[in-house]
Image: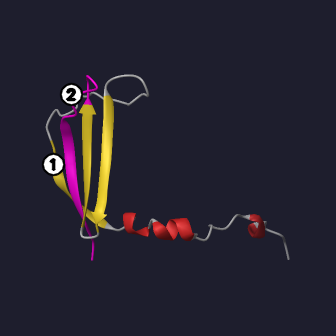
Amino acid sequence: MTDTGIATIPRPMVAGGETAALRRFHRDVTWSGGIREGGMGPGTIFESMRDALPKLKMTWDASSPEIILWRNEMTFDGMDWPLIEEYQMVPSD
């Protein structure tokens, strides 16, 4: 019998307590919502940097098991954070 080396391939890790505690944040969901036309400028890609503007703020509110809210906001001046897009996600059946 030839040794194929399969026994040396790492196996997936078993989820621990920390992963189990985060399970409620990792559900199958259905996305709905809208993206405002030109919300980030035509063809413009912004990447947040620590001490530079503009900055992006993306938040997930998973405080309700029935719906997860996701928001994307941006600031050019560090003061105002207008909404760029938002989605409501609900668990899939």
Using the image as rendered, state which of residue 35 and residue 68 is in the foreground. Answer: 68
Tag shown at residue 17: none
- The three-letter amino acid code for the residue at tag 1 is Gly
> What distance separates the C-alpha of mark 1 from that of mark 2?
16 Å
Q: Magenta includes 81?
A: yes
According to the picture, the residue beneath numbered tag 1 turns out to be: 34
Q: Residues within 10 Å of mark 1 (few under 14, many from 20)?
A: few
Among all residues in the image, which is located at the extreme right?
1
Rendered view: 23 above or below 53:
below
Q: Magenta includes 8?
A: no
The residue that appears at 50% across and 71% down in the rendered structure is 20
The residue that appears at 45% across and 65% down in the rendered structure is 22
Tag shown at residue 41: 2
Question: Can you tell which quarter of the image residue 57 is in?
Answer: top left
The residue that appears at 33% across and 23% down in the rendered structure is 53
Q: Residues within 10 Å of mark 2 (few under 14, many from 20)?
A: few
- Measured as percent of width and height from the top left, residue 7 is found at 76, 70
The quadrant of the rendering that contains the N terminus is bottom right
Task: Judge left or right: residue 29 versus residue 22.
Answer: left
Task: Judge left or right: residue 47 versus residue 80.
Answer: right
Highlighted range, magenta: 75-93
Question: Can you tell which quarter of the image residue 6 is in?
Answer: bottom right
Rendered view: 53 above or below 23:
above
Rendered view: 29 above or below 71:
below
- The three-letter amino acid code for the residue at tag 2 is Gly
The residue that appears at 29% across and 56% down in the rendered structure is 61
